[in-house]
Amino acid sequence: DANSQGDMARQELERRLEERAASLAAAQEENEQLRAQLSDATLQGDSVRQEMERRLEERAASLSAVQRENAQLRAQLSDANSQGDSARQELERELQERSTSLTVAQEEVAQLRARLEDANSQGDSAREELEKGLQERTA
């Protein structure tokens, strides 16, 4: 269950990271396009150039925000992986303890069965002796 939760959290973070990576690639591509447009704008006039500069700055800020968020998501993914590993190790330890307890219990059951068989055998011998003694008295 803890592994499942860790895996689900990790998968969600991986999905979000992939989305951010796609967004980053799109923002980078748009940045390149805006740079090309800025070059053309210098030939067309100051007002067009100024608009392109403004849009480029917005995209650069957006790109920086996406990069920061990607870094945060990577850190969260790392934390989720670590938590999943810790939970898995704890469950493996508990499983080992239970396995050891089961082995001990199985050994105890085997010993008790052997003692029961021995007691049954002694009981059978005692009953046979008593029956023999009873037959001797009645004969």
Image: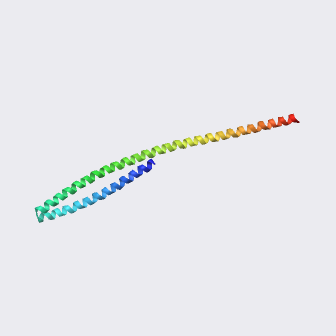
Percent x, y of residue 101: 55, 41
Q: Quadrant of residue 31?
A: bottom left
Percent x, y of residue 22: 30, 59
Above or below — where is 6 with respect to 139?
A: below
Chosen colour scheme: rainbow
Q: Residue at x 12, y 65 (%)?
A: 44
Q: Residue at x 38, y 48 (%)?
A: 80
Percent x, y of residue 63: 24, 55
Q: Residue at x 22, y 61 (%)?
A: 32
Q: Which quadrant is home to the C terminus?
A: top right
The total number of labels drawn is: 0
Above or below — where is 43 with respect to 66?
A: below
Q: Residue furthest front?
A: 138
In the rendered structure, the answer to whether residue 98 lies left or right of residue 117 reads left
Q: Residue furthest left?
A: 46
Above or below — where is 44 with respect to 9?
A: below
In the rendered structure, the answer to whether residue 45 lies left or right of residue 13 reads left
